[in-house]
Image (cartoon, coloured by chain):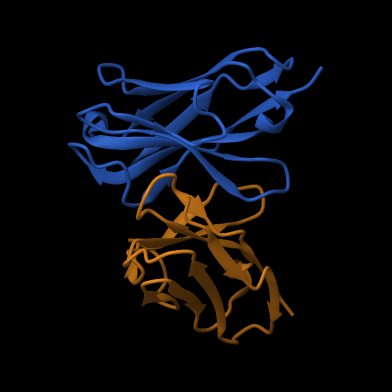
Amino acid sequence: DIQMTQSPSSLSAPEGDRVTITCQASEHIFEYVNWYQQKPGKAPKLLIYDVVKLESGVPSRFSGSGSGTSFSFSISSLQPEDVAIYYCQQYSSLPLTFGGGTNVEIK
Amino acid sequence: EVQLLESGGGLVQPGGSLRLSCEASGFIFSNYAMSWVRQAPGKGLEWVSVITGTSGATYYAGSVRGRFTISRDNSNNTVSLLMKGLRADDTARYYCVKDGCLGGACYSERLDHWGQGTVVTVSA
């Protein structure tokens, strides 16, 4: 199985700051990476797919980058409504696997 | 608008069985792969199983292979997960998820729509 190592596990930053989350895959997964947001008590929501593509309706302050085994997800200007847990996920091969999640809070 | 409505969760004893169902609407159901993803209390996301669109091929996580069976009824726009031999570590919220993977043997591209989930508790 492909392991997705996500870091940090949690972060706290002031409103308006840029925050970045990284995800390291245990093997080469090309650009088969997606990112999800899960707000408290809610189902996950797809934000970014294929590393860089923004899902319809998702604000442009969210972005992704990377290839091969190293990937990152950024929020350019952190907003109160961005408080959530963020997960990376690979679909290069089954089983689909997720990172452990990053809990993002406002300082 | 895509809607996914899960049902069938509940409390079951270890070793018991449960069938989860998911009713889908708002898209051409038969064209898309459908997955189940679970989340244990306070934990992260774990993919469980997928059934492809038109070919109906099935795949499972190692932790459930041989105990769980995914199926779909394209005439009724439903996907089901039959769970047997349930264990305490199967306790989780189970999400029905539509994939952006269209047709054929494609198993996954992106999990683009999620239901609200149904809770399964395995306990004596």
Q: Quadrant of the C terminus of chain B?
A: top right
The one of B81 and A41 positioned closer to us in this rendering = B81
**Residue at position x 31%, y 23% in the image:** B77
Q: Is residue B27 visible?
A: no
Q: Which chain is orange?
A: A
Q: Is residue A34 above or below residue A68?
A: above
Measuring from the top left, give residue B46's x and y in whole percent.
Answer: 56, 44
Q: Is residue B26 left or right of residue A101?
A: left
Q: Quadrant of residue B78?
A: top left
The one of A80 and B65 positioned closer to us in this rendering = B65
**Numbered label tally:** 0
Residue that extends furthest to the right in the rendered view of this protein = B124
Q: Is residue B17 above or below residue A35?
A: above
Q: Quadrant of residue B90?
A: top right
Q: Is residue B21 visible?
A: yes
**Residue at position x 58%, y 16% in the image:** B84
Q: Is residue A69 left or right of residue B10?
A: left
Measuring from the top left, give residue B50's x and y in whole percent.
Answer: 39, 35
Residue that extends furthest to the bottom in the rendered view of this protein = A17
**Residue at position x 17%, y 36% in the image:** B104
Q: Quadrant of residue A32?
A: bottom left
Measuring from the top left, give residue B54's x and y in whole percent.
Answer: 20, 29
Q: Which chain is blue?
A: B
Q: Is residue B1 left or right of residue A37?
A: left
Q: Is residue B49 above or below residue A79?
A: above
**Residue at position x 59%, y 76% in the image:** A79
Measuring from the top left, give residue A102's x and y in whole percent.
Answer: 63, 66
